[in-house]
Image (spheres, rainbow, N blue to C red):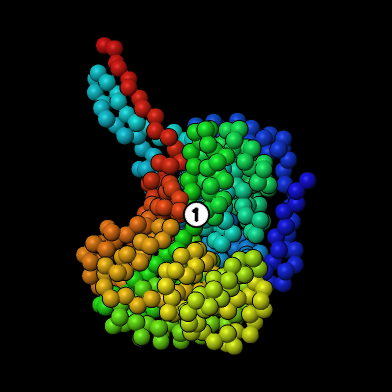
C-alpha cells in the first residue's frame, strides 16, 4: 500500500495524505470510464459545452476554500486570490471555439459524393498535472478533452494532492455523468502499467524532463498519443527602444511571481548596453521591496517554495554561480525569513555566463541572471543557447523587428512587450527539451481528437 503525503512548505507538516489505488482498482476505474465515454461522445456538442461551463462555475464557487488550500499545499500567498480567473478564461475560450474547431472539414457535398473529415474523440484521456498552477494547468486539457467527447482521468501532483478531488467534485455537482471524469491517486509503477497496457488513448503530462522521458518509455510501442510540456529556461530581451519601466516591471515579476515557480517564468534576461545600468537599478529596487513570509499572511508578497528539495536546488545554483564569479545584488539581510528550508530569499545575479548552471539548468525559483548584450545577433545566440524552448519575451517598439527576431528563435511562443502569460487563443507548445504537442486554441482540440475520413458514394 502506497500513501501519498502532501508536506506543507509553510511548516513542514503533513497537510494531507491519500492512499493510492491498487492496480486492479485503477484498471476497473478506467474500464468504467471507457464504458461511459461512448454515451458522452454521442451527446450533442452543445450539451457537453454547457456541462463543462457549469463545472467550471461550480469550481469558482469553491474559491474561498481553494485559495488558502493552495497556500497550505504549495506556498502561494493568499493575497493573489488563486487561479479561478485564469481557469475561467481558458475554459470559456475553449467552449467558445468548440463548435468551429470540431466542425467537419467538408471536401465535397454533391449529388454524387460526400467527402469530409470529422474529429472523433480519442476515448479515455489521462492528465498528469503539476503543482505550480494546479488548477490552470489541469483545466488546459480537462475542459477541451471533455468538450470533445473524451472521458478523463486526472492524476495530480502529490504536492497539490487535493486539487483533483476538488475539480471532480465541482463537475459532479454541475451534473456531469458518473464515471466520466475521475481523480485517481496513483504511484509511478501503477501509472506506467496503465500506460503500457494501453488503458489510455491519450496522455497529457506537464512536469519535469525526466518525467516526460518516463511517460515516453511507458508509451513506447503502444502508439498512445502523448502531449508533453516539460522544462523551461525562458529568456527576456530588452532592446534600446524598449519602454524601460514596463520591461523591468514585467520581466522581474515574471521571474519572481509564485516564488519563481511558473512554467513560462523568466529565468534569464539580456539587456542592451545602453539600458543595462538603469534596468539593473530598477530591478534591484523592486525585488528589495518584496516581503518573504507565511503565505497565509495578506502582507506576504513571496511565499516559500513548494518543497525544501526545490529550494535547495535553487540555492545550489546561486552558490555555484557566486563561486564562479557572479555577483548577487540582493542583500540576504533584507529577508530574515530565509530559513535554509523552503523559504528562500529572491536573488538577482549579474556577471553571469552561460557556463553557469543558473543560466542553463531550469531554476524554477526566485532567481534571475541578467547579462549585457551589444546587439540582436548576440541576444539571439544567447536566447537559443538552451536545451529548452517554451517562450521568449522581446521588448521593443518595433513590431517588424520583434517578428524578425522571433523567426530566428527556437521557442514555442514569442511575446512582444509581455511575459509569463498563456493566451488560450494561441497554441501552448514548446520545442527541444520543453516537449512536444500543443494545448489550447483550435490545435488543442485537434490533439485531443483524431481525424476520421468519410468517402460516401451515392447511388442514383
Query: Extreme right residue here?
Result: 1
**Would you place residue 194 above or below residue 300 in this image?**
above
> For this rendering, which residue is in front, 91 or 4?
4
**Would you place residue 262 above or below residue 222 in this image?**
below
Task: Identify the residue shown where x is 72% and y is 35%.
Answer: 24
Residue 119 appears in the picture as rendered: yes
**Numbered disc total:** 1
Percent of width and height locating residue 247: 36, 76
Percent of width and height locating residue 40: 53, 35
Percent of width and height locating residue 77: 59, 73
Dividing the image into 4 quarters, which one contains the C terminus?
Answer: top left
Q: In this view, does 424 lie to the left or right of 71?
A: left
Task: Identify the residue shown where x is 41% and y is 61%.
Answer: 386
Q: Is residue 236 left or right of residue 263?
A: left
Q: Quadrant of residue 66?
A: bottom right
Mark 1 Cα-neighbour bin, 10 Å: few <14, some 14–19, many ≥20: many
Task: Identify the residue shown where x is 59% and y is 67%.
Answer: 313
Q: Is residue 376 left or right of residue 37?
A: left
> For this rendering, which residue is in front, 185 or 284?
284
> For this rendering, which residue is in front, 427 or 409?
409
**Helix, strand or loop status at disc 1:** loop
Residue 305 appears in the picture as rendered: no
> For this rendering, which residue is in front, 43 or 330?
330
**Would you place residue 346 above or below residue 454 in this image?**
below
Q: Quadrant of residue 342?
A: bottom right
Query: Extreme top residue here?
Result: 460
Task: Identify the residue shown where x is 37% and y is 82%.
Answer: 279
Percent of width and height locating residue 102: 39, 39
- Residue where numbered disc 1 is placed: 230
Amino acid at each position: 500500500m502506497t500513501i501519498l503525503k502532501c508536506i506543507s512548505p509553510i511548516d513542514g507538516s503533513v497537510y494531507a495524505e491519500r492512499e493510492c489505488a491498487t492496480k486492479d482498482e485503477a484498471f476497473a476505474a478506467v474500464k468504467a470510464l471507457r464504458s461511459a465515454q461512448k454515451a458522452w461522445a454521442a451527446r450533442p456538442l452543445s450539451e457537453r459545452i454547457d456541462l463543462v461551463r457549469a463545472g467550471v462555475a461550480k469550481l469558482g464557487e469553491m474559491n474561498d476554500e481553494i485559495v488558502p488550500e493552495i497556500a497550505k499545499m504549495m506556498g502561494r500567498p493568499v493575497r493573489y486570490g488563486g487561479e479561478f480567473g485564469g481557469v475561467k478564461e481558458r475554459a470559456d475560450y475553449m467552449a467558445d471555439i468548440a463548435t468551429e474547431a470540431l466542425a467537419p472539414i467538408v471536401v465535397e457535398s454533391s449529388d454524387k459524393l460526400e467527402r469530409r473529415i470529422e474529429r472523433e474523440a480519442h476515448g479515455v484521456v489521462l492528465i498528469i498535472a503539476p503543482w505550480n498552477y494546479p488548477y490552470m494547468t489541469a483545466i488546459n486539457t480537462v475542459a477541451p478533452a471533455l468538450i470533445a467527447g473524451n472521458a478523463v482521468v486526472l492524476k495530480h501532483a502529490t504536492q497539490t494532492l487535493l486539487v483533483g478531488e476538488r475539480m471532480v467534485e465541482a463537475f459532479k455537482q454541475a451534473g456531469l455523468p458518473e464515471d466520466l471524469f475521475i481523480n485517481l491517486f496513483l504511484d509511478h509503477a501503477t501509472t506506467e502499467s496503465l500506460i503500457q497496457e494501453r488503458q489510455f488513448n491519450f496522455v497529457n503530462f506537464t512536469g519535469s524532463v525526466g518525467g516526460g522521458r518516463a511517460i515516453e518509455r511507458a508509451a513506447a510501442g503502444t502508439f498512445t498519443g502523448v502531449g508533453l510540456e516539460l522544462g523551461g529556461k525562458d529568456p527576456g530581451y530588452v532592446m534600446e527602444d524598449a519602454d524601460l519601466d514596463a520591461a523591468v516591471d514585467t520581466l522581474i515579476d515574471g521571474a519572481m511571481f509564485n516564488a519563481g515557480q511558473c512554467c513560462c517564468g523568466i529565468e534569464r534576461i539580456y539587456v542592451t548596453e545602453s539600458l543595462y545600468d538603469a534596468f539593473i537599478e530598477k530591478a534591484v529596487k523592486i525585488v528589495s521591496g518584496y516581503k518573504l513570509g507565511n503565505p497565509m499572511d495578506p502582507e506576504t508578497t513571496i511565499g516559500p517554495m513548494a518543497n525544501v528539495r526545490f529550494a535547495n536546488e535553487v540555492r545550489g545554483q546561486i552558490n555555484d554561480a557566486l563561486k564562479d564569479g557572479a555577483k548577487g545584488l540582493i542583500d540576504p539581510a533584507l529577508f530574515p525569513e530565509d530559513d535554509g528550508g523552503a523559504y528562500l530569499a529572491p536573488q538577482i545575479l549579474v556577471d553571469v555566463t552561460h557556463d553557469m548552471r543558473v543560466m542553463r539548468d531550469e531554476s524554477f525559483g526566485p532567481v534571475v541572471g541578467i547579462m549585457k548584450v551589444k546587439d540582436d545577433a548576440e541576444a539571439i545566440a544567447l536566447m537559443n543557447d538552451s536545451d529548452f524552448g517554451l517562450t521568449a519575451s522581446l521588448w521593443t517598439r518595433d513590431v517588424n523587428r520583434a517578428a524578425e527576431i522571433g523567426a530566428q528563435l527556437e521557442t514555442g511562443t514569442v511575446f512582444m512587450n509581455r511575459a509569463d502569460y498563456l493566451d488560450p487563443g494561441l497554441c501552448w507548445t514548446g520545442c527541444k527539451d520543453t516537449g512536444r504537442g500543443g494545448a489550447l486554441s483550435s490545435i488543442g482540440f485537434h490533439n485531443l481528437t483524431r481525424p476520421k475520413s468519410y468517402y460516401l458514394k451515392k447511388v442514383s
